[in-house]
Amino acid sequence: MAMTSSTEMNQEATASSSEAALPSSEQTITGVSGTNYKIALPSNWQEVPDFTSLNPDNDFMLSDALETKYLAAVVESKQDFADLETYLGLVQENLATSFDTTATFLPIPDTKAYFVDFPATVEGLNIHYIYYVLETENNYVQLYGWTLESLYDSSKDELTAIMNSFKEE
């Protein structure tokens, strides 16, 4: 097995991220819940196999081919919560506890959605998250993307574009 240094891997990932944007096409993703989602994905993105072993709460998880950028969703029935603001408050508390962050969600104009981005250290890795909490017709969704902190500046536009394309069918 060939060993690649983290510097070589970062250079490779950075080169890939800084290339012209890869063409995107709208894909249908079927979550564990059986719900279908439409999402515009670049050609080098795919579903992560066996993602429920990483986080059993996720309805789906996607990554780029280099596995340097990720996107996942936690989907919960609106019937179980009073309203979006209540759900948002619970998510905020959970993030504060899990990631020791005081980052505040901001509303996304003209939508039923909020976002925040924040750095965190997970299992010794410095990660940067983009986190959306949004309301669909039947559910509240935590849609979140992440990458290594060193790749965040070159990855955030791609992650944001993918997240902004999300629709529940």
Image: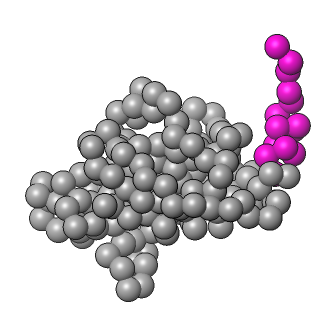
Q: Residue at x 57, y 66 (%)?
A: 160
Which range of residues does the magenta coloring cover? 1-14
Residue 79 x/y as whole percent: 11, 58
Q: Is residue 108 visible?
A: yes
Q: Number of labelled discs?
A: 0
User: Please, which residue is most extreme toward the bottom here?
Assistant: 110
Nearest the viewer among 131 and 126 is: 131
Instruction: Name the residue: 53% across, 53% down.
Output: 145
Vertical relation: 81 (above or below) 11? below
Indicate the quadrant containing the N terminus: top left, top right, bottom left or bottom right.
top right
Q: Is residue 91 left or right of residue 116?
A: left
**Residue 66: which quarter of the image?**
top right
Q: Quadrant of residue 112?
A: bottom left
* Magenta residue check for 167: no
Q: Position of residue 23 (x, y in %)?
A: 68, 62
In the depicted structure, whether residue 20 falls above or below residue 75: below
Indicate the colouring scheme: one colour
The residue drawn where x is 36% and y is 72% is 113
Query: x and y percent of residue 77 in the render?
Result: 18, 54
